[in-house]
Image: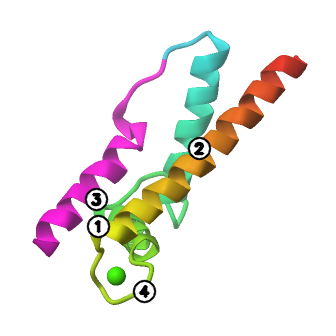
Amino acid sequence: MKKLLFTTLAICALASTPALADHHEGGKMKEKMGMKHDKMFDKHDSNADGVVTKEEFMAHVEEKFNKMDADGNGEITKDESREYYKAKHEEWKEKKGKMKEEKAAE
Ligand SMILES: [Ca+2]
Ligand SMILES: [Ca+2]
């Protein structure tokens, strides 16, 4: 069960990291996405050597696991998971709000 959860987290981390998606020229949105990708990539590339090793990637996943495991007992309960994603959603909503404000200001 733990292994399955860990695998799910790894897939989630991979899915939220469009590291393998190529981006094309043009378009402000695509430019922003590219910047976001680079930022995400750099975040994973902890020794900044231009590649993300499995160890670096898994360290990132483990960090996420530890964030979700609010009481630090090595297990993520449904409630902890729910709280984590609720907080993430709030964070996202806040970011989206800021982006809208920025866009309105342009
Ligand atoms: Ca690296
Ligand atoms: Ca826990």
Q: Residue furthest front?
A: 79
Q: Look at discs 1 and 3 and give the one toward the viewer.
A: 1
As shown in the figure, which amino acid type bears the numbered disc 4? Answer: Asp
Dot 1 beta carbon under 8 Å from ligand 2: no
Dot 2 beta carbon under 8 Å from ligand 2: no
The residue nearer to you, when weighing 48 against 32, is: 32
Quarter of the image where the C terminus is located:
top right
As shown in the figure, which amino acid type bears the numbered disc 3? Answer: Leu
Helix, strand or loop at mark 1: helix
Q: Residue furthest top?
A: 26
Label 2 belongs to which residue? 92
Q: Earlier in the sequence, mark 3 or mark 2?
A: 3
Label 4 belongs to which residue? 71
As shown in the figure, which amino acid type bears the numbered disc 2? Answer: Trp
Q: Is residue 1 visible?
A: yes
Is residue 62 rendered magenta in the image? no
The residue nearer to you, when weighing 103 against 80, is: 80
As shown in the figure, which amino acid type bears the numbered disc 1? Answer: Lys
Where residue 1 appears, x then y in whole percent?
10, 71
Q: Is residue 55 visible?
A: no
Dot 4 beta carbon under 8 Å from ligand 2: yes
The residue nearer to you, when weighing 44 against 12, is: 12
Helix, strand or loop at mark 4: loop
Label 1 belongs to which residue? 78
